[in-house]
Amino acid sequence: MRQMKRKMLAALMVAVMAGSSMATDVLCGGQIPLINNVIGVGTMTLDFGSAGTAVECAQLFINNNSRVWDLTISTINGGQFENYDGSSIITPTAAGLEVSAGTLVGTLGTGALATFPVAVTLAGAASVTWSATQTTATVMHNLVIKATWLKPTNLAGLYTETIVAAIVATL
């Protein structure tokens, strides 16, 4: 009987040990918030009283920390500078508006450089999209938009073009 008690106690111990063993997985982590913006700065002091060659008319600054992003740049007046009612137009030369890398400080994300359109022309109703895939964040990367025009014979007044820049991030 004593031996039977020991066997029952041993079986009970095994059952208790097997029934009270436990394992768990614990997940720890955090999140880096998405940064996805483009900042535009335009020049309102272009000298249309004389010819201009590769004159900087706008700058864009890109900030993005997603893996993939698309930046689309387009114009409202097809790359032309128009007066208040569109009755008088200053048309850039055949090159149109040129978009290229700026010289200001900023960091382009690793990997994005391979797909950068080094010099792109915006003329007519054109737009350009830069699709970038990166492994590090883009911080204040600078693009410049320049225009070249002949000396106009237009009437006096303010002539403008609206440049639209939109960035879309893919997580």
Image (cartoon, rainbow, N blue to C red):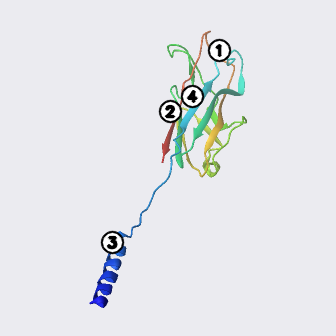
Left/right placement of residue 104 relative to residue 62 reads right
Q: Secondary structure at mark 4?
A: loop
- Label 2–label 1 contact, CB within 8 A: no
Q: Give me the disc on residue 153.
A: 1
- Label 2–label 3 contact, CB within 8 A: no
Q: Give me the disc on residue 125.
A: 2
* Residue 25 at least partly seen: yes
Q: Give me the disc on residue 19.
A: 3
Q: Residue at x 60, y 37 (%)?
A: 62
Q: Earlier in the sequence, mark 3 or mark 4?
A: 3
Amino acid type for the residue under numbered disc 4: Gly
Amino acid type for the residue under numbered disc 3: Gly
Amino acid type for the residue under numbered disc 1: Thr
Q: Earlier in the sequence, mark 1 or mark 4?
A: 4
Residue 133's spot in the image, x, y percent? 56, 50
Q: Nearer the viewer, mark 1 or mark 4?
A: 4
